[in-house]
């Protein structure tokens, strides 16, 4: 690959919202926003099965790997990896729960509410340039130990891949660059794409549908980490755009363009 575009997007789950921000009022704009940017791979978080089905139907050039975090099949939120079938062939996939028992649905460490997962897909590049390892994850939103230990587990999951494949680990990390969990991730052989890109933005990635967004208040919480290889980060963009006058999710999508030197 000479150019690779990867997006991370917490699409906000479909439950609990009414009125303007309910899923039925956002879904067409959200799918159109992804299609307009045309990423080679995009990773989602908070996607329930019905939301996964909608994206699959309306973005048919992509297939995906990911499971529901509640039962390991379809129940609960997915942290999933969508990839263009024209560009990649799926080799294998696996999902880990970010907990002391990563092979079974579970809540980790000091987390109290939600199971959290990391999905990994091995994809073969159809242009013959080799294979890549791609991750999509969602760390706990408040539990500091679960964030730190979850990040350490993600590193452990991807470390064996580095010798033979370039890695790209996207997600809603729920932490800013000043946090312990970020520091755990952002050390060799993994690097933050935004901090290493030629061009980047410092906008917060979570805005909660606030009308004053975009803002630079606390820093981004959605990140893409990568290992060194054929591709390096060129542009890292927080897409602070509206469709139909509204934000399609309570997070901005985060788009990174990688280039081969």
Image (spheres, rainbow, N blue to C red):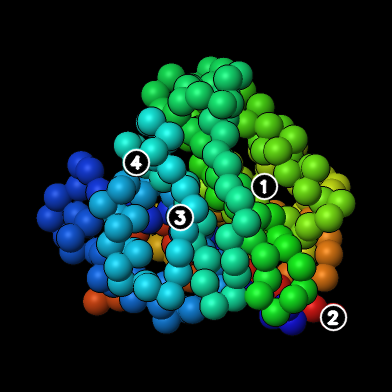
The secondary structure type at the circle numbered 2 is loop
Mark 3 or mark 1, which is nearer the start of the sequence?
A: 3
Task: Name the residue at 25% across, 70% down.
Answer: 28
Graded by Cα atoms within 10 Å as few (under 14), some (14 to 19) or many (20 or more), the crowding at tag 3 reads: many
Q: Residues within 10 Å of mark 4 (few under 14, many from 20)?
A: some
Image position, residue 187 (x, y; %): 82, 45
Q: Relative to 241, does residue 75 appear above or below in the rendering?
A: above
- C-alpha gap between disc 4 and disc 3: 15 Å
On screen, residue 246 above or below 260: above
Q: Secondary structure at mark 1?
A: loop
103 to the left or right of 168: left
Residue linked to disc 4: 74
User: Any mark on residue 206, and which?
Assistant: none
Label 4, label 1: how far apart the Cα atoms are: 32 Å
* Camera-side mark, 4 or 1: 4
Q: Quadrant of residue 58?
A: bottom left
Q: Nearer the viewer, residue 85 or 77?
A: 85
Badge 3 marks a residue whose secondary structure is strand
Earlier residue among tags 4 and 3: 3
Mark 1 = which residue? 177
Q: Which residue is mark 3?
A: 44
- Disc 2 from disc 1: Cα separation: 27 Å
Q: Which residue is mark 2?
A: 261
x then y, percent, for residue 50? 26, 52
């Amino acid at each position: 690959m000479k150019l690779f575009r990867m997006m991370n997007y917490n699409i906000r789950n479909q439950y609990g919202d009414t009125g303007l921000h309910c899923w039925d009022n956002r879904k067409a704009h959200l799918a159109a926003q992804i299609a307009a940017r045309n990423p080679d791979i995009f990773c989602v978080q908070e996607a329930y099965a019905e939301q996964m089905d909608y994206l699959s139907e309306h973005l048919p050039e992509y297939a995906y790997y990911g499971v529901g975090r509640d039962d390991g099949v379809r129940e609960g939120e997915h942290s999933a990896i969508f990839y263009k079938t024209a560009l990649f062939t799926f080799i294998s996939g696996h999902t880990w729960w970010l907990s002391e028992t990563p092979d079974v649905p579970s809540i980790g460490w000091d987390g109290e509410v939600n199971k959290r997962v990391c999905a990994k897909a091995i994809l073969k590049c159809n242009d013959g340039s080799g294979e890549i390892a791609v991750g999509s994850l969602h760390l706990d939103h408040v539990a500091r130990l679960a964030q730190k230990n979850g990040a350490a587990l993600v590193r452990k999951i991807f470390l064996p891949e580095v010798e033979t494949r370039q890695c790209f680990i996207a997600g809603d990390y729920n932490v800013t660059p000043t946090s312990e969990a970020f520091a755990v991730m952002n050390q060799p052989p993994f690097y933050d794409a935004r901090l290493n890109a030629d061009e980047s933005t410092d906008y917060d990635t979570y805005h909660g549908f606030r009308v004053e967004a975009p803002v630079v208040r606390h820093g981004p919480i959605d990140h893409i980490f990568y290992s060194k290889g054929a591709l390096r980060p060129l542009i890292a963009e927080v897409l602070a755009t509206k469709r139909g006058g509204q934000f399609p999710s309570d997070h901005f999508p985060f788009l990174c363009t990688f280039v081969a030197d």
